[in-house]
Structure formats: structure tokens, C-alpha cells
Image: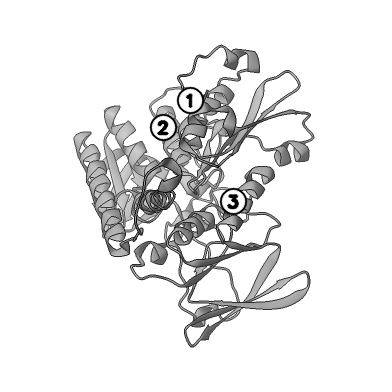
Amino acid sequence: MKYQVAIIGGGPAGYTAAEAAGKAGMSVVLFEKDKLGGVCLNEGCIPTKTLLCSAKIADHSKEGNKFGVKVGDVDIDLPKVIARKGKVVRKLGLGIKAKMEGVGVTIVTGEAKINDAHSICCNDEVYECDNIIICTGSKTFIPPIDGIENVEYWTHKEALENKEPLRSLIIIGGGVIGMEFASFFNSLGTDVTVIEMLDEILGPIDNEISSLLRAEYTKKGVKFILSAKVTKLANEVDGISVAYKVDGEERQLSANKVMMSVGRRPSVDLLGLDFLNLNVDRRGTIIVDEHLETSCKGIYACGDINGRSMLAHTAVREAEVAVANIIGKQDRMNYDAIPSVVYTNPEVSCVGKSEEELVIDGVEYKTFKLPMSYSGRFVAENEGLNGMCKLLTDNDDKIIGVHILGNSSSEFIIAANIAIEQGMHLEDFKRFCFSSSYSE
């Protein structure tokens, strides 16, 4: 069996590449060892957003009196929330399968291993190919904490399946995943503590915006311990104890459950990459050029596996670029305009450079800040709340970064994304006419 394109991994990068190549008339085989949709659909973006939607409805219901709507006691039926999440995932998974079949993609279920630059083995069958696109994604990184092997900790996978009320939860890691789960469990009434090694949550996101979000969740009762290193985990009668060091002092906390959320690492196990001698960095991520091609001609790497931007929508765009170059169209990847969203309540959305990045790079810039209360619709829909929109430009007023705290920012960050992608200046952007929306 010979194919023009062989793709390993059926997540956002993999199924996007397969569909694009199939539409271009190429013969395509797609290998997936588990379920189509990858982590994003089955245990990441989609199920998390589904749970957060239920949580946000509950939050709004509790605040109904502010809007003149009287609501009784709000009860979250967690088993029903989890069941709905499963229904959403199944529906979208069937949609992906239908797309693949619609463009003639051959789907092979099993663990694929690369034999050489033009052949792949799966289920004891050998598949020859002209091009290979590696889209195997990433996996949760579990740090070597003393005692971790003896406790039943959660990752995002276990948290997504929990159907029982939880009195207390410690989340180790205050990145995007950690904060989204902190938001969800806080809405359920769980006592949540976030322990973060850095001096601010949300890592690479603009520090001022991150600080404002942390302040919002502190008001809601979430506790934050920053600049802290977890040193030991141990079982207790009704939970887990977490020992950590902050300011040189050893301290300890306990909770019913502990969730690990300290990052992800590329999934390269069993791929057979040793024979290809691909260039990789110290973390094992595969190094690619602007066309997503690796150091081995005809082999591409898209999505989390290349470590450039571990976001599903980035993976989709990377897959489009890779296939375009395979079929002979000129296209290149631009990482300057990749939007990032934290689906907390309120949301955080950003695109382009942060102030911290610009300072490190020695780039001169200008800052413009506006409270979200400048938007009439925001005031109408967010009683007693505010947010901030921060816009960064270079000295010539070219837009290079936009960072927003406020609900529905995920819907209008795309306007800033387009402005940065197109190299717009402030005067260019002012010429656009927006409807009476948040983007005004």
C-alpha cells in the first residue's frame, strides 16, 4: 500500500492535514491509536469548555438578582454535566470521521511506527508513502515529586470525569489548564488552592492581565501560593497532604484531591524517530522550519510535537501550511499572530507580544489601556464588573500586542489577531466600523 501523504496522529493537526490533502486529490492514510480528535476533542479543549459553560450558567444564575431575575437555589447536577460533556465529544468525533471519509482518507486504528523516511508500520502492516506528517501531540508532564508514586493524584483527564462533589482541591500549576479547572471547581463550591512555582499565574501571558485575573479569583475565594516549589506528597485519612517550600520555609497543606497541571511534553515514544536523525531541542520537541518541514526532507511535524505553540488552532494552521507546501503552494507559518484564550470567568484573551517579551527583546513600545466599561454592551451584560483592554504598539504605531481581561473577549480578539497578522497601524484599525459589540 502506497500513499502520497501519511499522517500519524488524528488530533487537530492530523485531521486538518488529512482533510486538506484529501481535498487536494492526494491519497492519504491517517494513523490514530485511540480516538479521532486527539487530546483537544476527547480530553482537552472541548470537554473543558463544555464544563466551563455549565459553570458559567450556574454563576450567572446565582447573580440573577443583579439583572432583575429572581432565581432560587442553584444546584449543579454534576453527573448530568459530565454526561452532556460526553455527548458533545461524541457528536464532534463523528463529525471528524465523516469529514475524513468524505475526502477519501484511509483511517487506520493502531500505534504507528516510522521505519524510514518513506514507510510506516502499523498493526504488522507496512505503508509506503511519499511524505510523512507527524502530529502525535503531547502528554501531561508529571514532575518527580517525592511521594507522588504513592498518591492517587488527578491530571486533567481524571478531573474531567469526576461526578462527585469535592470539598477541597489543590491544583499544582497555575497555567491555563490549572486556572480553567480552578474556575470550574470554584463555581461548584469547592475550596480551591493553586500552587504556582513562578511569581505569577498564567506563565507567558501578560503579567498585568494575569495579576488582575488572580485578583478576581481571590475575591471568589480561590487561594494562590506563588513562587512555591512542591517538595512532597503524602496520603492522609481523607485526602492528600502537599508539602511545599516558599521563601525558604517549608509549609504544608491538605485537600481531598490534588491535581497535577505543570505543563505538557511532546509525545515521541515508540515513533521510531531514532533512524531519521531529526533535529530536536533539549525537551525532545522536533525542530521545524517556517513550512513545518523537519531536517529530513518530506517529513513534517505539526502541533504540540514541535513545541512552537501548544494550541489546537495553531496546530490547525500549521497543518494547512505543511500540506500547502507538499502540494507545491507557497505558504509559511507566522507565530506573531496566534491568539490565546483562558476560558475562565472572566475570560483572558491575548495575541502578539506582551510587555515582558518586549522588554526582554529590548524593543521600544507604547501602551494604551482602556477599561472594558468603555464598551456599552460590556456594561449592559456585566453588572458591577470591569475589565481591561491593553494595546501595545511600536514607535510607529504599528499594533504588536493586544491583551484583554473581560468576558466575551474570546469572541473579539480575532479583530486584534487580524490587525497584527496584516501589520496594521492604529490609523488603519480606526477605519474599521464595528457593530455595537464588545469590539467597539
Q: Are marks 1 and 2 in contact (CB under 8 Å)?
A: yes
Question: What residue does disc 1 label?
Answer: 331
- Residue flagged by tag 2: what amino acid is it? Glu
Viewer-closest of 9 and 339: 339
Q: Quadrant of residue 247?
A: bottom right
Which residue appears at 45% of the width and 41% of the height?
Answer: 315
Whether residue 115 is visible, yes or no, is no
Q: Secondary structure at mark 1?
A: loop
> Which residue position holds label 3?
216
Quick check: 61 left or right of 281? left
Q: Does residue 47 lie above or below 229 as drawn? A: above
Question: From the viewer's perspective, is the residue at label 2 or at label 3 nearer?
Answer: 3
- What residue is shown at x 51% (from left), y 79% (from top)? 149
Q: Residue at x 48, y 44 (%)?
A: 311
Q: Is residue 401 left or right of residue 13?
A: right
What residue is disc 2 on? 320
N-term-proximal mark, 1 vs 2: 2
Instruction: Out of 117 and 418, give the one closest to the viewer.
Output: 418
Relative depth, front residue between 413 and 34: 413
114 relative to 387, above or below:
below
Residue 67 location in percent, x, y? Answer: 43, 41
Give the residue drawn at x 58%, y 25%: 420
- In this rendering, would 136 be left or right of 81? right
Query: Looking at the picture, how far across and down is residue 195, in whole percent?
Result: 62, 65
Mark 3 to mark 1 CA distance (whole Å): 42 Å
**Quadrant (top left/top right/bottom left/bottom right) for the N terminus:** top left
Mark pair 2, 3: CA separation: 38 Å
Badge 1 local density, few (<14 within 10 Å), some, or many (20+)?
some
Label 1 to label 2, Cα distance in Å?
9 Å
